[in-house]
Image (cartoon, rainbow, N blue to C red):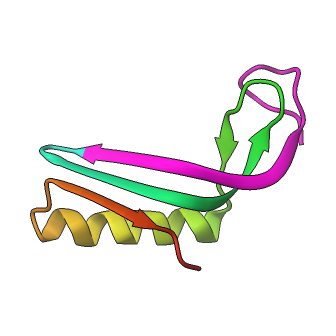
Amino acid sequence: MQCVICKHGETQPGQATVTLERDSSLVVLKQVPAEICANCGEYYLSESVTEEVLQIAEEAISKKVEVQILKYAA
């Protein structure tokens, strides 16, 4: 797919580091499967991966975690 950000690059399967922040919580997920633009590095997550990432972040926030760094496990 063509990147909607830079409009020049094509995306390729890879892994991204996703950082989410809300209030005083910071959640970092490493090695998340994504489509990554070969030109600018922007990443795109599938709907199912996005749901999982958001669920993990919500759990961390509900536990009042300040910083959590995890390796994504499908």
Q: Could you tell me which residue is drawn at 63 percent across and 64 percent down?
A: 47
**Left or right: where 41 falls relative to 17:** right
**Left or right: where 17 falls relative to 62:** right
Q: Quadrant of the C terminus?
A: bottom right
Q: Could you tell me which residue is drawn at 51 percent across and 69 percent down?
A: 72
User: Quick check: 14 above or below 52?
Assistant: above
Give coordinates of residue 31: x percent, y percent. 58, 60
Quarter occupied by residue 65? bottom left
Give coordinates of residue 70: x percent, y percent. 39, 65
Most foreground residue, 47 or 9: 9
User: Quick check: 8 above or below 10?
Assistant: above
Most foreground residue, 33 or 52: 33
Q: Could you tell me which residue is drawn at 47 percent across and 67 percent down?
A: 71
**Left or right: where 68 falls relative to 55:** left
Q: Residue 22 lies in magenta, yes or no?
A: no
Most foreground residue, 37 or 31: 31
Q: Quadrant of the N terminus?
A: top right
User: Quick check: 17 above or below 71?
Assistant: above
Q: Which residues are magenta?
A: 1-21
Q: Residue 18 lies in magenta, yes or no?
A: yes
- In the current view of this chain or complex, which residue is farthest to the bottom? 74
For the image, the number of numbered tags is 0
Most foreground residue, 18 or 50: 18
**Left or right: where 58 falls relative to 48:** left
